Amino acid sequence: MSSHSPLLIGVAGGSGSGKTSVARAIHEQLSLDAVLLDMDAYYRDLASLPFDARTRVNFDHPDAFDMDLLVEQLGALRAGRAIEKPTYDYAAHTRAAGTVHIEPRDVILIEGILLFTDARLRQLLDIKVYVDVADDVRFIRRLRRDVEQRGRTLESVVEQYLGTVRPMHLDFVEPSKRYADVILPEGRENRVGVEMVLANVLMALAQRRGTLSLRPPGAPQ
């Protein structure tokens, strides 16, 4: 890592918007210059609650996240210190026992639905991207993900979507896009938009490093 302060990039958007894919696309282009964090890892530890009580928690409300820990660890990475990022067990609805060691990099990427709802997080982020995708597309993507990857049933996904996901999206996620520096329609499929975001990231890195010698991806040497 260079001696310059890392560039912090937040990618937000509704559940199923493709924000993770957008963050990964940027991360892949930056290679070892970047590290990617997921906000979902910072759900509060609910191990003290019975399983049935955990399933009734509103995981789409800002209070479901340990914002203090997230702010603390992002601040540590910005200051050049490594962190132990928590991990989350989606099937058990609680924090897992293991952590992931994360070293600071020139670029710190973080993605999550409620990144822009906390003023402390917004102040830490240098570039804020909001991925804007139609509601029906987001729901289908969420349904597939939760059933195939998180061990949920069709009925539980639909119940959660109607009970908390959609209302919380309207109350918190959608309004938070007013804080975005860039609104990216259609997510990763918007190749021009993703390339424009990446170009801005490279420009910001060049300014921090005091050089204009960075090449755009794919440019001849």
Image (tube, grey):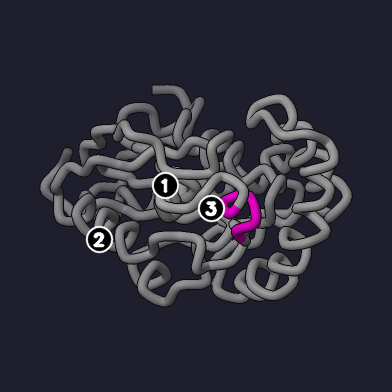
Q: CA distance from mark 1 to mark 3?
A: 22 Å
Q: Which callout, 2 or 1, points at the residue further toward the start of the chain? A: 1
Q: Which mark is residue 72?
A: 2
The amino acid sitting under disc 2 is Glu
Residue 165 x/y as whole percent? 72, 58
Q: Residue at x 25, y 36 (%)?
A: 102
**Mark 2: few, some, or many residues within 10 Å (few <14, many ≥20)?**
few
SS class of the residue under badge 3?
loop
Count of marks, rendered view: 3
Q: Residue at x 15, y 42 (%)?
A: 2
**Quadrant assignment, res 148:** top right
**Mark 1: few, some, or many residues within 10 Å (few <14, many ≥20)?**
few
Q: Residue furthest right?
A: 136
Q: CA distance from mark 2 to mark 1?
A: 22 Å
Q: Which callout, 1 or 3, points at the residue further toward the start of the chain? A: 1
- Residue that badge 3 annotates: 112
The amino acid sitting under disc 1 is Ala
Q: Which mark is residue 47?
A: 1
Q: Residue at x 22, y 55 (%)?
A: 78
Does residue 149 appear to the left or right of 7 in the view shown? right
Residue 6 appears in view:
yes
Magenta part of the chain? 53-57
Magenta: main secondary structure equals: helix
**Mark 2–mark 3 CB contact (< 8 Å):** no
The amino acid sitting under disc 3 is Gly
Does residue 196 appear to the left or right of 83 in the view shown? right
Q: Residue furthest left?
A: 3
**Mark 3: few, some, or many residues within 10 Å (few <14, many ≥20)?**
many
**Mark 2–mark 1 CB contact (< 8 Å):** no
> Which numbered mark, 1 or 3, is in the foreground of this view?
1
